[in-house]
Image (cartoon, coloured by chain):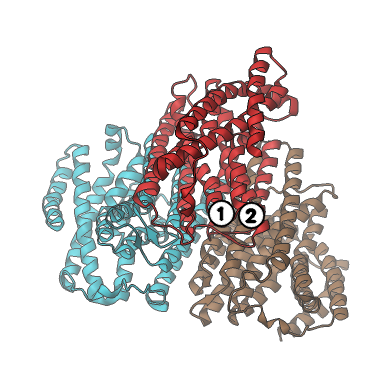
Chain colours: A red, B brown, C cyan
Amino acid sequence: MVNKLFLILVLAGVPLSVAGSLMHWPSVLMFIIYCLTIVALASFMGRATESLAVVLGPRIGGLLNATFGNAVELIISIFAIKAGLIEVVLASLTGSVIGNLLLVGGLSFFMGGLKFKRQKFNVYDARHNAGLLMFGVVVAFVIPEVFAQTMSESETISLSVGISIILIALYLAALFFKLVSHRGVYQSNEGGAEGRHEEPEWNKKIALTILAAATVAVAYVSENLVHTFHEVGETFGWTELFIGVIVVAIVGNAAEHASAIIMAVKNKMDIAVEIAIGSTLQIAMFVAPVLVLVSLLFPTAMPLVFTLPELIAMVSSVLLIIVISNDGETNWFEGLTLLAAYFIMGIGFYLI
Amino acid sequence: MVNKLFLILVLAGVPLSVAGSLMHWPSVLMFIIYCLTIVALASFMGRATESLAVVLGPRIGGLLNATFGNAVELIISIFAIKAGLIEVVLASLTGSVIGNLLLVGGLSFFMGGLKFKRQKFNVYDARHNAGLLMFGVVVAFVIPEVFAQTMSESETISLSVGISIILIALYLAALFFKLVSHRGVYQSNEGGAEGRHEEPEWNKKIALTILAAATVAVAYVSENLVHTFHEVGETFGWTELFIGVIVVAIVGNAAEHASAIIMAVKNKMDIAVEIAIGSTLQIAMFVAPVLVLVSLLFPTAMPLVFTLPELIAMVSSVLLIIVISNDGETNWFEGLTLLAAYFIMGIGFYLI
Amino acid sequence: MVNKLFLILVLAGVPLSVAGSLMHWPSVLMFIIYCLTIVALASFMGRATESLAVVLGPRIGGLLNATFGNAVELIISIFAIKAGLIEVVLASLTGSVIGNLLLVGGLSFFMGGLKFKRQKFNVYDARHNAGLLMFGVVVAFVIPEVFAQTMSESETISLSVGISIILIALYLAALFFKLVSHRGVYQSNEGGAEGRHEEPEWNKKIALTILAAATVAVAYVSENLVHTFHEVGETFGWTELFIGVIVVAIVGNAAEHASAIIMAVKNKMDIAVEIAIGSTLQIAMFVAPVLVLVSLLFPTAMPLVFTLPELIAMVSSVLLIIVISNDGETNWFEGLTLLAAYFIMGIGFYLI
């Protein structure tokens, strides 16, 4: 049923996006159309990736998920960098991090907790993820912030490039660790990985075609979306920071939100947590550094230096989720705590 | 015996307070009289609340404790806000947070640890509290600090009010979670809550009368106490910050100090920890936001923006207690570590 | 074999150091000679301390290790303070903290993890150490940094001295806790401490002689080493900060690096972790405060105030190691994560 809705949205949204951008329809209208279209396209990309993952087996599937899972953010961001909107890109990276941890995580814990009194997930994964969050956000994002204060611009870019290469390398090492070297070593006894005998929704050929078509469409729509930010911000009294942190992040991650919550309500917390935290790690350790490297091809290079509010929002989100997920258990109140933190940051980014 | 001492203190202190403030006795003398009287009155309020809690059952009792537990701080602070002493209020909130975590917590762990080699408490409560401390202090206090740097005064107040409402809402949700939704779900096996068949010290009527009378008296004394700060500070070379953070906080929490240590020495660490950390959460998630909202009724609104030293003192205290209480065990050395941290901060606030 | 190499290094290095410094050989050459000689001498001091520890029993042995373990850093630093190089000393303390946690810890976890899939160590020790790291670095180093911003120089020194005394007192209390009061209380079942029946390498007399001789030699070479920093920095384009944080720290801790890795590869992770984290605690809670107190004897007093990059590097290292070591288990990927964090900081200190 949700899938049908997304199909309609794509079939209507893509032509409307093309028509509207050619005929210069009002920015706010186009902003809404673009956002809805991207959400729908993202869901198709997600399902195609999922099908490919089933066909190609868990290793390559895991790799696919880990690299294509945030393709939409990557594409939107590249067009924003091309348009020189460095601040918006950094803001939307921030938004993805806090959105995935607090909003996706919070909604899954809360909704799942309404149905089940105590929900458990693999505590080894939680700890593994905690270490990576600490590394990817607290070390790799805080260090350039502080060190760049007394650096020249070119030194800041050098530092950012160096850190980006290390981040990507460690991200690949983490995939190798998880999918090859220590696959199954830390499995919980409850056998979360049993249900892998599932049929793919689409066969390989169809999945690849859909993935390619949806990627092209997302790229086209994203490029246009980026150019509506300025006018939309003026209309609603939103800063570009707010658009980046809250709006773009919600649009870019809508598909993940939906599937994490569905998994939580089905009491498959391992998967819900994996989506929320895994997706955050992908943003911090793969999308962000790739964007830094890609930005070198454009006139304005993007340093890995966030504003202080962005950085503090990310760091406090990470500390909160680490403390809350530390015991491998969730309940509705832990979800509510995460949501409350998200609202506090939302108010902050709205007023700033 | 302690109770007798407090009775004498009240019977002598209240008349002396009235006489002294009417006859304008020297500030330093009055400061000492006020402080001792408040400590004694607070102990009566605590015992009255305790009796009511026994009479009214654990749910309403828990609610009572959770709202009246820090009534003294609330009353002192309201009079300080009325007198325009916003900085002193923020300082005394800081003092309550670090005092409860480091001084109350430290003394209980240390004194208990001198008698017992290893003391245990419910690890689920510890983790639940850790999440709330991270939320209530690290997220809810740090965000306005950083975001307000570039905000106008009215935006800062809006942000403070928004955060305060969220804090109070989550605090109420936490009570609902603990007293209703998940009551007994995370009980430790050792049955800390068994001993609830106790007789109340006073019956409902007496307890209510004492609570009302003590509250009125505390209010009267507090209003006068607040006006001695300036002169006392000058006499002893204390800054108002030091008076707020260290002196007021110790006076306002003296009763809790005593009962937490008594519980620790009786090896009832569940209760000792509950007093130290529960009281901190009450300050951060209930007293502080209520004061922000109440301050809107007065000429000077109080933002939820601490000074950087105050904030860092609170954040590092929270991180320290989370790491130390994480395993559900204490010993004398953990207590000493907390006390050492308190002394370091005390020196800092004295010299600043 | 390694021991033979170090013997040759000492026998060649000490005379060359004397000759070179008398004949004013080029700074860079002397810098290399001094560094190698110190590394070799440090290994002799380590072995002598070890032998004495075996002879004198675990209590006094533990005390010896805990005080002489970082004698080389202490000696180098005192000569640097004497030369007025306060910044270099603070930088090398920073370097020792992050070097021990991230480089020594990272290499041991990584090398050990290449051989064993999962390595365990005493989780009680890990938690005890986590509390001390939080206290020694996050509380005791962050507080003066923030509070000193508005303090006069003499207040900053007072604060530093006060904190130093508390740090040393708590460090001694920690030794008493570990070696006397709670000795064996938190022993893991796997009996890491069984292998204590070992023979000392040298008897008491020889060990004391070697320790004394090596200490004198280290002192002599260190004093000369300190005076090469300026020219070496200019030659290689290194800042004094980089020399302090990275170069001096690696030289000063080379012996520990070697023994931690050897222990990890032998699957004795308890000892490897003890070297990495115990050595860090010794630097933060003993060497640093002793240097503050010693500096009072010299013209320039050293405040316990690091630069912001140094502080952030230490705090994020501590948070990372706490999260990673929290579960009492390691694997190669956790080691790699620590190493990646070290490289990020290394790039930062190089570029700053």
Q: Which mark is residue A291?
A: none
Instruction: Give percent across and percent down for residue A304.
Output: 49, 34
Residue B327, visible in the rendered structure: yes
Q: Position of residue A37 (x, y in %)?
A: 64, 28
Residue C287 seen from this side: no
Q: What is the chain identity of the residue bearing mark 1? A: A
x, y percent for residue A326: 52, 58
Residue lying at 61% horizontally and 67% vertically, measured from the top left: B125
**Point 59% across, 74% down: residue:** B188
B139 or A58, which lies in front?
A58
Q: Count all numbered tags in the image, as a single digit.
A: 2
Side of A315 where B53 appears, left or right: right
Find the residue positioned furthest to the bottom.
B1
Please name whichever residue, C95 or B161, is drawn nearer the observer in this view of the structure: B161
Q: Residues within 10 Å of mark 2 (few under 14, many from 20)?
A: many
Q: Are marks 2 and 1 in contact (CB under 8 Å)?
A: yes
* Label 2 sits on residue: A112
Q: Is residue C240 above or below residue A290?
A: below
**Considering the image in quadrants, where does the C terminus of chain A appear?**
top right
Quarter occupied by residue B108: bottom right
Q: Chain of mark 2?
A: A
Q: Is residue A86 left or right of residue B183?
A: left
Q: CA distance from mark 2 to mark 1?
A: 8 Å
Residue at image mark 1: A269
